[in-house]
Image (cartoon, rainbow, N blue to C red):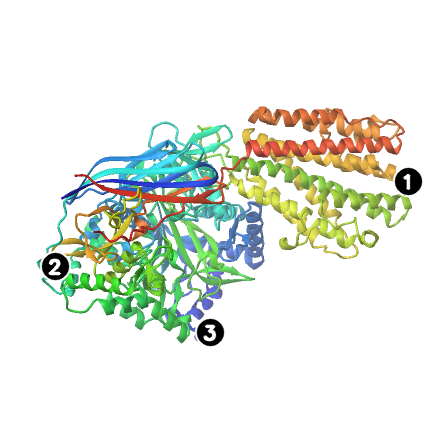
Amino acid sequence: MSDTALEDLGRQYSPTVAGLGIELGRSPATAPHLRSGDLRHDEMVDTRGTVRESWRGVGTALVRVGPAGLRDRARTVARLLADDGATYRAPTTGIERHWSLDPLPMVVDAEQWTGLERGLVQRAELLDHVLTDLYGERRLIAQGLIPPEVVYAHPGFVRQVDGVRLPSSRQLFLASTDLARDAAGAWRVLGDRTQAPSGAGYAMENRGVLSRALPGLYRGTGVHRIAPFFHTMRRALQRLAPEHGPARVVLLTPGAHSETAFDQAFLSSLLGFPLVEGADLTVRDGRVWQRSLSGLEPVDVILRRVDSDFCDPLELRANSRLGVPGLIEASRLGTVAVVNSLGSGVLENPGLFAALPRLCRAILGEDLRLDSAETFWCGQDDARRHVLASLDRLVIKPISRAAGSSVLGWTLDAAAREALRRRIDADPGAWVGQEALPMSTAPTLDGDALAPRPVTLRSFAVADGDSYELMRGGLTRVGRDRDSVVLSTARGAASKDVWVLSPAEVDPGAAGPARLVGTNGDDRVDLGPETLSAAVSPRVAHDLYWLGRYAERAESLTRLLRVVDNRWRDLHPAPEPALAECLVVLLQVLTTVTATYPGFVGEGSTRRLAAPEAELAIVIGSEDPDQDRIGSLAYDLRNLRQLATAVRDQLSRETWTVLAGLERGLAAVGAVGDRRDLDVTGGLNAIMQAILALSGLMSENLVHDEGWYLLDAGRRVERALQTVGLLRVGLTGAANRAADELVTESVLIAADSIITHRRRYPAGAGPGTLLDLLLRDPGNPRSVRFQRRRIDADLSAVGIDPVAVALAELDAALDRVPDPGATPDNDARATAVAALTTVEDRLLALHERVDAVHFAAAPPLQPLEQYAAASGAVPA
Amino acid sequence: MRRYAVQHVTTYTYDGPVTTSFGRTHLVPRPGPDQQVTNVEILVAPEPAELREHTDYFGNRSTYFCVREEHHELQVTARSEVRVDRSRPDAEKLAAAPWEDERAALDAVPTLTEYRLTSPRVALDTDLRRYARDVIRPGVSLETVIEDLLTAVARDFTYRSGVTTVDTSVAELLDRRAGVCQHFAHLAVACLRSVGLAARYVSGYLETFPPPGVPKLQGADASHAWASVYSPTLGWVDFDPTNNQLVDDRYIVVATGRDYGDVPPLKGVIMTSAASSELTVGVDVTPID
């Protein structure tokens, strides 16, 4: 690569950077930090437009691949993210969308990083001292080093955990900080994340995806690995266990509907610790236990992603459904270590910023290394006056994130500004004003072009013994516009992988032993040996069981749809009456087995049967999840995905690639809509392939533990139900003999047994052969008898006694299905169909029994009614 | 000096089975220089699987319990004997300086700031501030401030049970002008905080007497609440806005906090599908000779 090419890149890119500083008059008001006319710092090019030394690798690669190549990489990145099921749920709308990653990394050179690392470790140590003091002696308040109101009025100060200590010299376990650069290029702190910092999982996902999408560049650049951070975190969590021996660590999640559910589940699998919800835990005998199918397992350490306030409905928010009553009591007893410790949210407090330099000198005896963006706490009169006089230039923040989000003063009209002024005046201590940093820009793919976009950096530190280890990387958020000021994922900011360069002379591979486990390109997390049995909670067992049922249901429906599609396509060139009658039977079956009424039965069905396209499109599903009819293929697949999301930590990573394939297949058939020339064959085939891959993963890539047995039981129950449904159709048949044969054949195709049938019964099909192959044959993996055996094996593994009666009744019903004989009359057929209906009832009864025995949720938690002090008597 | 035997019984009856009850109580009188507490007993029925006590953030005795036996009724009984040795505050010291001077001295004690701010049940909105401004006159002593507050509550508010709930706010009380001791205590605390003084909420008991000639009924007393204001010379000075008087040795302090929410006698969560419950509370404060 010639230097000329790099110079060209710099020249082409830099004018757009220069343009940033001088653009004026954007509505509703121009951000003050862009008004000055100063150049903003750009990460890639210096003020002369020369590509910086640390970016030469990325710059060279940019030149080499060119705009088209970069777009290809962006598509690869998007596809890999979809394959991993990497998502984020917007907090306001609740809509889950794909995680967004720019294909260009954020590069930080070694020298710069060293400075940042020192500053961030110092900050973590300082905040740790503050946290320890606030829930202990509170001398920093008594000595006047921290304004008392900043703590006492902060909703994150949890008095109930006063005196609770972790068995560690550090009380602040995870410390994250959001940073941005000022005009001079110096990194400054925007805010701290100490409640339950999110994003480390996303950072690892970004690294995995980018190292696969840009393998050559990644390998050639000499980037620090971030996997060691997770090893340290895993080890540090285990060391928090109050007792020696293998520690049971769990990750407490608010659930699959949480904004950062992916981040949590991915972190849980990186660490090798199970993901649990509050309802999976219980406190008894002064300690925390995880519910499992086989009893209670003690829990030693809880890494929480639930905010403190929601963690214990006994002591904090009584109506919280996310917590564990008694958790604070157990923490106080020291039988469980909760990190970040309850109450650590008090440090997410920009009201503390102004006090930090003095605190740092008083506590650590050194100067604070990292400045924050200049921040004025309104609890002090001078600062408040300044903020009120400068509302149009500052970012106004409540000191507690729980109280609301930041307001950009310059975007407010006069009335809104006045309203804000009144709110600040009413409770000044609850507010700060923060200068708007210009923030640096980094090259970002915007449509077809490279554009400078503002960036922030989130760092991740974990307490490791007496000090902190910083992830040598992080999470960068990128503004959508060049004058974005608040870069939050919730507001739609994309992300970047952060590449911290290792010093040139050091081979990055030498930093640690090469590890061969994991799938993140060069940057891997070795999980190490598992020492504890996997406890499966009733909630997880329930979701796995239904995952099995929906996977099977989707498969059966896809097979049936393929048969219908096949007959439908045959009918066009050759409109035979028998074929038409067979199609009518199949369409009606489609409606009854999926319960997608009205479908092809009841009032108006003649019309819909005559032109089935619209109704068929509905059974497959629309593109809009809200429009999905219950029972449609799209509905089944969306349920499948939701259940997989809820038990993500139980599944292999490839599962998400397969689910992404399902989604693409569904998009292919869904896009067809209700056009007259309904062509879904290709899409259904793609879906079928993905479902088969999923079946393979389920049987070959999951450890056969209690959870797996229930997953398999779910599949078997569903397949038995589906086969019985098909058998009923086959036995009912059609009036016309030729049509009847076609129906029987269709049933055998849908039940994936046509080839065996042809081989075994050369004389042709009839009700007897159908029952023989699909009901009784113990060797046919599609037969009801086969499912019955597997159910037995599955349920034996999790305790069969409670369902023994239900199984015996199923057996009796199976035995009572008569053979209608070689040439049955209608009565004999009807008798067999009625007996099959009983089999179906028994299967459903078995399902209900399994549900009651294994998935029994604890009764709901309710707060006790409280009573007022109500004495009014006047003493004598 | 007076001695009392205190019994406080709380009973919940449910219309369905409860599998587990978790509870936290502030039912044991807190020890202090002016009261000694002995023979403490906390009885939970059914028999709790766990029962533990600790001293909370505010220095109160707090009990955690957990009942795991299925039950339709939960009863929590707290008994103790209390020797109260409390004299009325030194009026001379209380009258020595204007309250604004006392307020200025509070700044030297940052930890008291806790009691000078709003708290979850003590909001300081415009109406409250206006009311407090009318009651608390500039330049008077802390003694007069207390007196004026007592007089104002007696004049402006009616004691009436059943018109308010445990969650009634100070603003609602100002609107309705009627309530029970808990709300009057919150109001007094709010008024004091609104002018920058340090004030806290006190939960406890007060010995009561039936009308002449009527025998005192079992459980006829109730849990009581009053307010306390901090004097840099005297420390906390308790007064009872409900009964228009300073607190003396007929009062038993159970717990103190920023407001009721820090020190409810009993709170809990239960595991049940029961739709409704019935609550009865009985308190007996019996003098021991």
Q: Which residue is mark 3?
A: A27
Q: Which picture quadrant has residue B125?
A: bottom left
Please give the chain letter of the residue carrying mark 3.
A
The amino acid pointed to by label 3 is Ser
Identify the mark nearer the N-term, 1 or 3.
3
Q: Residue at x 45, y 39 (%)?
A: B271
Q: In the image, is A411 to the left or to the right of A638?
A: left
Q: Residue at x 59, y 43 (%)?
A: A657
Between the C-alphas of marks 1 and 2, the distance is 106 Å
Q: Residues within 10 Å of mark 2 (few under 14, many from 20)?
A: many
The amino acid pointed to by label 1 is Asn
Q: Residues within 10 Å of mark 3 (few under 14, many from 20)?
A: few
Between the C-alphas of marks 1 and 3, the distance is 74 Å
Q: Which picture quadrant has residue A47?
A: bottom left
Q: Which residue is mark 2?
A: B94
Callouts 1 and 3 on one subunit: yes
- Residue A736 image label: 1
Q: Secondary structure at mark 3?
A: loop
The amino acid pointed to by label 2 is Leu
